[in-house]
Amino acid sequence: MLYTDKFSYNPAMKTLDDAPEISSGEEFSDALVAFIQVEEKDEGDLRGREKKLVNTLKWAARKNNTQNVILHSFAHLSNSKANPDYSKEIFDAAEIRLKNGGFNVTQTPYGYFLDLSIQAPGYPLARLFSDL
């Protein structure tokens, strides 16, 4: 997770055939960006995985005094990858739970490689890692 002063993306390459067509990017400020990898071992425990994810994101957002959370699929953190449909379910469930908790939540386009631009401040809680 990175707390960012500014974060933006532009779609570069579609990686899942059934992903919706996306032609433009977005820019955000004052946001916690979560680079998330759902692994094969996580499959079958949607509610438990989603709950741990959301609790971790809420904690990190509060530590950085932001209500803005961006969920970014980053399936490059491990050799083990969950089924893409299952991973997307976790993202969608986490988004709903975070929104119900008063957070502003965005997902980067799922099924794309993205060009990223990140401006992050240099203090310890702006860069966090958690293995759930």
Image: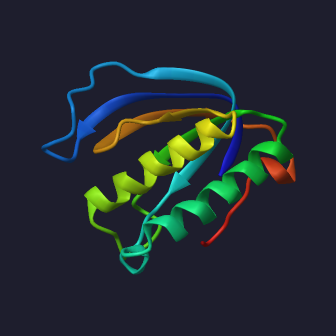
- Position of 15 with respect to 122 (left or right) is left
Residue at 41% in and 22% down: 25
- Position of 65 with respect to 29 (left or right) is right
Identify whether 20 is placed above or below 36. Answer: above
Residue at 27% in and 57% down: 85
**Camera-side residue: 129 or 116?**
129
Q: Which quadrant would the C terminus be assigned to in this image?
A: bottom right
Q: Find residue 52 and report its image quarter.
A: bottom right
The percent position of residue 29, horizontal first and vertical second, equals 67, 23
Q: What is the residue that sits farthest to the front in this orientation?
A: 100
Identify whether 129 is placed above or below 43. Answer: above
The percent position of residue 56, horizontal first and vertical second, equals 69, 59
**Camera-side residue: 65 or 118?**
65
The percent position of residue 127, horizontal first and vertical second, equals 74, 53
Residue at 69% in and 33% down: 102
The percent position of residue 129, horizontal first and vertical second, equals 68, 63
Residue at 62% in and 38% down: 100
